[in-house]
Image (spheres, rainbow, N blue to C red):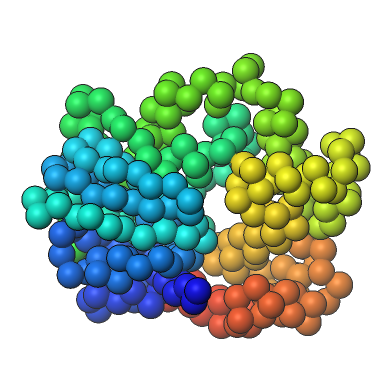
Amino acid sequence: MYLKRFEIKKNIQKTEDKNLSFRVFDLGTTSIEEYLKPHKKDHFCIILVESGNIKVHVEDKIYLLNAGKIAVIFPEQIHFLSNLSNDVIGKIILFEEILFCSDILKNELSAYNVNLSVHLNCTALSNLEFEQVLPIIKNIQDIYNSPSLVKKEQARFYIKIFLLGLIESIHGQHPVLHQDTQSPDQNTYTAFKKLLNHQYKTERTVQFYALKLAISTKKLNTLNKKYSGETAINAVHNRILTEIKRQLLFTDRSHKEIAFDLGFSSPSALNKFVRAKLKETPTDLQHGLSQIYTA
């Protein structure tokens, strides 16, 4: 089956969207028609239901969202929507990881990151928690409708506050996320993520990480598929790619300096890696990022 892959930079509803890294839409509008068939996205998608109900299909699971429930769908997860009730009211928020997802999940809060994508696919908030969320969502939508350079920075923090609140909520709902109750497999996966964040610039083979963790490469792949939905080598490559984007956007380093900082043998090796992953050159990538984040 052919799956469409939606890119946030191609989702242009108004002129300002070319320079924004997030979108906000109302549920129950024609803007979600394209979401009614299985697809992937290169960005995060939040679906929040205020009233009515809707089904969210994520990979092999189906979640019924009604008032007070929120789904966070991660990049590359196969998903679609169905069974929208006539009275459904809510929001869809799209955003890119590079700007809004903090490294704290990979370091200080690493224990929260075990199977996080699965737990966040459907979260039920208490009435009080949901009432506290709604003003944050309204602020994000107001900024989307009337953006400015300063307001875009505000939106970044509003979304981060919103996500951290959800993570804290599921931390209480799922005891498995507590660090002192993690299984050996979960501890190993968490250890891999920590090790990857320290070593990705110099070590990019699955064999290295498996040896450090005293497990087989097959076991490491199995753990990654279980807890993140991606292979170990993809986890390594995606970590490198995230850093490439950050350095292209937030530093004044040349492509040559970035290449050597990230362990590539030459700028051409960096170019080849980016082309293989994104089908574009580092120059094209940098231009696209600058249009979104600094325009």
Q: Which image quarter holds the C terminus?
A: bottom left
How far across and how far down the image is residue 3, in percent? Answer: 47, 73
17 or 122, nearer to the observer: 122
Q: Residue lying furthest left in this view?
A: 87
The residue at 56%/77% (across/down) is 285
How far across and how far down the image is residue 293, in percent? Answer: 42, 67
Left or right? Give the position of 204 relative to 78: right
Left or right? Give the position of 175 relative to 238: left
Left or right? Give the position of 35 relative to 217: left
Relative to residue 61, is residue 141 depicted above or below? below
Residue 92, by quadrant, is: bottom left
How far across and how far down the image is residue 22, in percent? Answer: 34, 61
Relative to residue 47, is residue 144 depicted above or below? below
Residue 111, by quadrant, is: top right
The residue at 36%/60% (across/down) is 80
Report if residue 205 is visible in the image.
yes
